[in-house]
Image: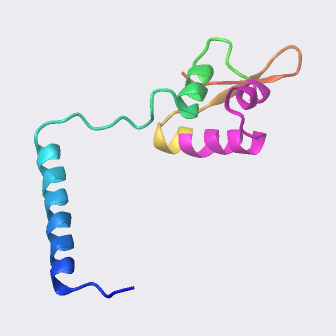
Amino acid sequence: MAAATGTENYMTRVKSKKLCADAAEQSQSGLQPKSKTRQNSKTNTLIALLKRKQGVSIPEMMHATGWQSHSIRGFMAGTLKKKFGHTASSTKSKFGERRYHVA
């Protein structure tokens, strides 16, 4: 493997600076910032389920996302609260099943 020459290093730096300049130009041109999540993400799926009037149980969330229960609880304690500012509340149904929901 041959070592990079000075010209190759210079060209790499020039390309890198050009990419940075292009990105800065786009950000100043008024482009809309990306949303916090993708449109069809598991996070959006869970938030939609949590916003339902009847709420959602952990087994339903597990089925909708394919996540394990500890991942669901971590999402509600971490991502939902810190990233989105929602607080999940829970109620126990007459059948003993805990249902979670956000306002």
Give the residues in magenta: 57-79
Vertical comparison of 17 with 3: above or below: above
Vertical comparison of 3 with 41: above or below: below
Q: Is residue 25 left or right of residue 79?
A: left
Q: Can you give x and y, in whole percent of width and height, for residue 80 in the image?
A: 55, 38
Q: Can you give x and y, in whole percent of width and height, for residue 43 in the image?
A: 55, 33
Q: Residue at x 14, y 52 (%)?
A: 22
Q: Is residue 8 magenta?
A: no
Q: Main secondary structure of the magenta part?
A: helix
Outermost residue, right direction? 95
Outermost residue, front direction? 1
Q: Quadrant of the N terminus?
A: bottom left
The residue nearer to you, when weighing 96 against 51, is: 51
Q: Is residue 10 left or right of residue 94?
A: left
Q: Is residue 17 left or right of residue 100?
A: left
The colour scheme is rainbow
Q: Is residue 58 magenta?
A: yes
Q: Can you give x and y, in whole percent of width and height, for residue 4 in the image?
A: 27, 84
Q: Can you give x and y, in whole percent of width and height, for residue 79 in the image?
A: 55, 43
Q: Residue at x 75, y 45 (%)?
A: 70
Q: Is residue 55 left or right of residue 24?
A: right
Q: Residue at x 36, y 34 (%)?
A: 35
Determine which quarter of the picture holds residue 62.
Answer: top right
Q: Quadrant of the C terminus?
A: top right
Vertical comparison of 19 with 56: above or below: below
Please tell me how many numbered marks the rendered image carries. 0
Determine which quarter of the picture holds residue 51.
Answer: top right
